[in-house]
Image (cartoon, rainbow, N blue to C red):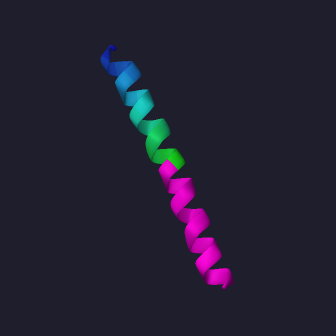
Amino acid sequence: MDNLSILIDAMVRLRNSDLRVRDVKGELFID
């Protein structure tokens, strides 16, 4: 993999994990 592919993959993973964290926080606040 070249550097650009690694960078894009890392950004996608961060965005996905950030969305997951937000969903969990939202559930906690709702409860």
Q: Residue at x 63, y 73 (%)?
A: 26
> Is the residue 22 above or below the residue 13 in the image?
below
Give how far across and how far down residue 25 sits, in percent. 56, 72
Is 30 situated above or below 22? below
Residue range highlighted in magenta? 17-31
Q: Measured from the top left, where is residue 29 in percent x and y?
A: 62, 82
Instruction: Determine which quarter of the picture holds residue 4.
Output: top left
Query: Residue at image x 44%, y 46%?
Result: 14
Q: Residue furthest bottom?
A: 31
Q: Is residue 7 above or below residue 1?
A: below
Asked if residue 18 lies in the magenta stretch, the reply is: yes
Number of marks in the image?
0
Horizontal and vertical percent for residue 2?
A: 32, 14
Counting from the top left corner in percent of width and height, residue 11 is at 44, 38
Residue 10 occupies quadrant:
top left
Q: Main secondary structure of the magenta part?
A: helix
Q: Residue at x 68, y 82 (%)?
A: 30
The N terminus: image quadrant: top left
Q: Is residue 28 left or right of residue 15?
A: right
Q: Quadrant of the C terminus?
A: bottom right
